[in-house]
Image: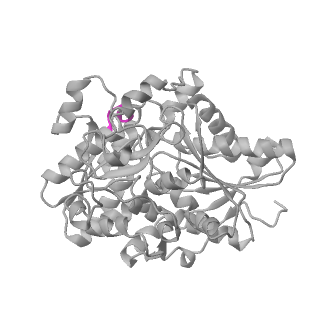
Amino acid sequence: MKNKIPTRIYLNEDEMPKFWYNLRADMKNKPDPILHPGTLKPVVPADMEPIFCKESVRQELDETTRFIPIPEGIQDFYRAFRPSPLIRAYYLEKVLGTPAEIYYKFEGTNTSGSHKLNSAGPQTFFAKEEGLTSLATETGAGQWGTAMAMACGFYGLDLTVYMVKVSSEQKPYRKAVMETYGAKVIPSPSNTTDSGRKILEGDPNTGGSLGCAISEAIETAAKTKGCRYVLGSVLNHVLLHQTVIGLETKAALDKYGIKPDIMIGCAGGGSNLGGLISPFMGEKLAGKSDTRFIAVEPASCPSFTRGRYVYDFGDTAKTTPLLRMQTLGNGYIPSANHAGGLRYHGMNPVLSKLYKDGLLEAQAETQTEVFEAAVKFMKAEGILPAPESSHAIKAAIDEALLCKKTGEKKVIVFGLSGTGYFDLQAYMSYNAKTLSDKVPTDEDLQKGFDTIPDIPQNK
């Protein structure tokens, strides 16, 4: 390419972030506090430590420290796959005929195939430092479960993974990778827990949801000595760990004096999107930029675009603390679309607050149009994207085509959060034209809203 900007912008290992960036420290209007479901008062560390690792709890509740050091033991883990490349999508730009500059931060350059390792490593490290011997977690499409299996293999801890049943059926090879790393994988809901059995009694044929799987993992952690629960999205400490994505993206763009006009990420629980945009959102909050931020979610699970901003439980069995977030209700069971990592009823509290305050936009896309965008991207850029990431691709292409129509030369940055090589069944369905676009009716959504707790803060 004749352009001075290379196709791939790499950082040196020495340029890898040494700190995580805590966006909450720079938010004047902070997210509402996490509440204890019994007292309805803000939680304190002692409320959460029986379930989560102590250091994770400390980070979860820290709203004042801007930069939190990344321990050397975690930096050692990161060096195996970071820094990740920022790629200029020259070929996609050419196919689209757009004057826009398109960049994507590629997080699929590791065995797990996604960004999930960025938090799996720290949470497992904290557990090891605390003297724990095992962990329990859930996974939707399998990226988080795979990442946790890798991290537990690296640090030497046992792992139990509750995998959403429909995803375990759709993506058996991710299950195989987890088991090869030594993890125990259980399709959820299952008969191994009280919460799983209760869910199955209500609907024996359910395909499950992340809310169901979270309930089972939390119950297992609570009943197992030397075990804690870890999760791959939604909570603030997970988003914090993912800020290595945004910090690296900003460092790479700064090398060439590039300022993004639009930043786009897929949104399920929010950690990938939040990690990408946090450093740039911090600049916007400080009045240093007017970047637009766009969250893209599946039309089948529209927690941003059709959800309610209220306190809700993070799981179906209602065992978690209460989070003020955009939610469809803890009992909402989304349709079995292939973007399993986006099948969650709620959204991270930080992102929910930014959306409520008008600092973050959101849009919902149907499955067929998302896969059309994925194939267009694949043919141009040579990377098979995950169904989740393809939601961001769809929005990026739309914005680039709008630039073509208006003649504006905008800089568009999106997160390519993972690869789709374990999602080939989804692509087979797309090629066979058997994908369906299931968009919930208002009546469908009401069933989920009916499960939102009736508490004074929700009035």
296 relative to 59, above or below? above
Q: Answer with left or right where residue 254 lies relative to residue 436.
A: right
Helix, strand or loop for the magenta stretch, by majority: helix
Residue reaching furthest right?
A: 407
The mark total stands at 0
Q: Answer with left or right where residue 19 lies relative to residue 453.
A: right
**On the image, which quarter does residue 156 sit in?**
bottom left
Instruction: From the top left corner, tell me how far across and down residue 8 is, in percent.
Output: 68, 62
Magenta region includes residue 166 = yes
Instruction: From the top left corner, tell me how far across and down residue 95 is, in percent.
Output: 79, 42
Instruction: Using the rendered image of the protein, determine whether residue 415 is visible from the camera's viewpoint.
Output: yes
Residue under the image location 51 percent in, 46 percent down: 267
Q: Nearer the viewer, residue 366 or 98?
A: 366
Query: Which color scheme does this rendered protein use?
Result: one colour
Magenta region includes residue 79 = no
| Quadrant placement of the C terminus | top left
Instruction: From the top left corner, tell me how far across and down residue 195 is, in percent.
Output: 20, 38
110 relative to 219, above or below? below
Residue under the image location 64 percent in, 65 percent down: 284
Q: Answer with left or right where residue 142 lies relative to residue 243.
A: left
212 relative to 383, above or below? above
**On the image, which quarter does residue 290 sit in?**
bottom right
Instruction: From the top left corner, tell me how far across and down residue 17 is, in percent.
Output: 52, 74
Q: Which residues are magenta?
A: 164-168
| Quadrant placement of the N terminus | bottom right
272 relative to 45, above or below? above
Instruction: Using the rendered image of the protein, determine whether residue 108 is visible from the camera's viewpoint.
Output: no
